[in-house]
Structure formats: C-alpha cells, structure tokens
Amino acid sequence: MLSNDFSPQAAVLWKKLPEDKQQIILNKVYCGQCRSAVTLVNVGGFTEGSSLVLQGSCVVCGKNVARVIDGLG
C-alpha cells in the first residue's frame, strides 16, 4: 500500500506512529468523489509545518485524496 514517495522528514514522522494507528489513518480517508471514508492506497507523504500530509489514491474510485495529520513535527 505504501510507496517510497515519502520525503525524509515525512518518513520519520510516519514511522513514529504505531502500526495500528497507521492502519486506522489509512483506512479512514474522506474521498470527495465517493463521499465516504475510504482506504488510501499508493501512499506518499511530505511535511508542511508541524503536519504530515499523506497523499494517495482512493481504493474505490482511484481519485487522488489526501489526509493531513496535525501536530506530529
């Protein structure tokens, strides 16, 4: 599910999260096209300020979606 498309800083922040929390985050991403929570696939990430931004595709429709996780940095 994860790609190698993480910035070095984002990879460090992501790896700090416990695996069970990572799965919860990846499985509850809102897709505007599907209008529901979906699973994020082909995931990459970067940091913006103290936030981790995950980008990827909706597992249902394939549209680009993102999830911002605040306060990790």
Image (tube, rainbow, N blue to C red):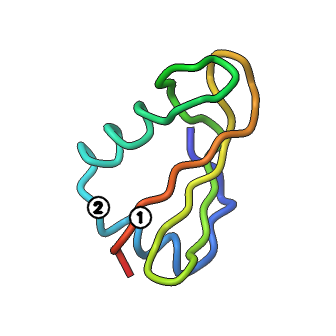
Image coordinates of residue 46 in percent, x first then y, are: 61, 70
Image coordinates of residue 23 in percent, x first then y, are: 35, 39
Image coordinates of residue 69 in percent, x first then y, are: 42, 60
In this figure, which residue is indicated by the disc labeled 1?
A: 14
Q: Which mark is residue 48?
A: none
Contact between marks 1 and 2 (CB within 8 A): the answer is yes
SS at mark 2?
Answer: loop
Q: Which residue is at 63% across, 55% downward?
A: 44
Q: Quadrant location of the N terminus? A: top right
Q: Quadrant location of the C terminus? A: bottom left
Image coordinates of residue 31 in percent, x first then y, are: 60, 29
Residue 29 drawn above or below residue 59: below
> For this rendering, which residue is in front, 30 or 39?
30
SS at mark 1?
Answer: helix
The residue furthest right is 63
Residue 36 drawn above or below residue 9: above
What is the C-alpha distance between the residues marked 1 and 2? Answer: 6 Å
Q: Which residue is at 57% across, 77% downward?
A: 48
Give amino acid for label 2.
Leu
Q: Taking 63 as reference, is 56 left or right?
A: left
In this figure, which residue is indicated by the disc labeled 2?
A: 17
Quadrant assignment, res 17: bottom left
Quadrant assignment, res 15: bottom left
Q: Taking 58 as reference, is 29 left or right?
A: left
> For this rendering, which residue is in front, 42 or 65?
65
